């Protein structure tokens, strides 16, 4: 599956994965407001076997198919104090 990854300019290490370039219609408006103006960071072909730095590819694919997007936020351990 083709996948487009957008970086948040407001929140460090926060990304939205989409199955279509600029396909934000499935992302809730309140989330987009918190996220800020999305910046395209990466375009990849996503498969269940693909290695991602912080996410499981299968989970990302599942979210893309079920809800039309995947939100990646830093874990509690990765957030600055």
Image (cartoon, grey):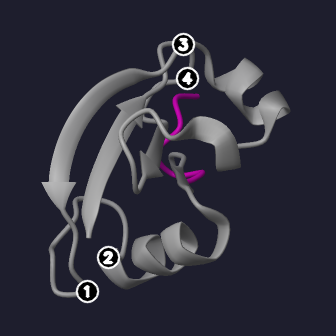
Task: Identify the residue position indicated by label 2 in the image.
Answer: 57
Q: CA distance from mark 4 to mark 2?
A: 22 Å
SS under mark 1: loop
Circle on res. 37: 3
Answer with left or right where residue 7 lies relative to residue 46. Answer: right
At horizontal 33% and vertical 60% (from top left) the residue drawn is: 54
Q: Is residue 19 magenta?
A: no
Q: CA distance from mark 3 to mark 1?
A: 29 Å
Task: Identify the residue position indicated by label 4 in the image.
Answer: 11
Give the image location of residue 71, x and y in percent: 56, 51
Q: Considering only order in the chain, which callout, 3 or 4, is on the residue closer to the N terminus?
A: 4
Q: Nearer the viewer, mark 2 or mark 3?
A: 3
Q: Considering only order in the chain, which callout, 2 or 4, is on the residue closer to the N terminus?
A: 4
Segment colored magenta: 75-81
Circle on res. 48: 1
SS under mark 2: helix
Q: Considering only order in the chain, which callout, 2 or 1, is on the residue closer to the N terminus?
A: 1
Rendered position, 54 above or below 21: below
Q: Residues within 10 Å of mark 3 (few under 14, many from 20)?
A: few
């Amino acid at each position: 599956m083709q996948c487009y990854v957008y970086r948040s300019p407001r929140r460090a290490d926060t990304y939205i994965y989409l199955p279509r370039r600029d396909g934000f219609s499935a992302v809730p408006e309140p989330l987009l407001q918190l996220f800020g103006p999305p910046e395209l960071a990466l375009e990849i072909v996503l498969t269940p076997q693909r290695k991602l730095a912080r996410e499981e590819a299968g989970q990302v694919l599942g979210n893309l198919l079920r809800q039309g997007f995947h939100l990646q936020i830093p874990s509690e351990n990765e957030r600055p104090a």
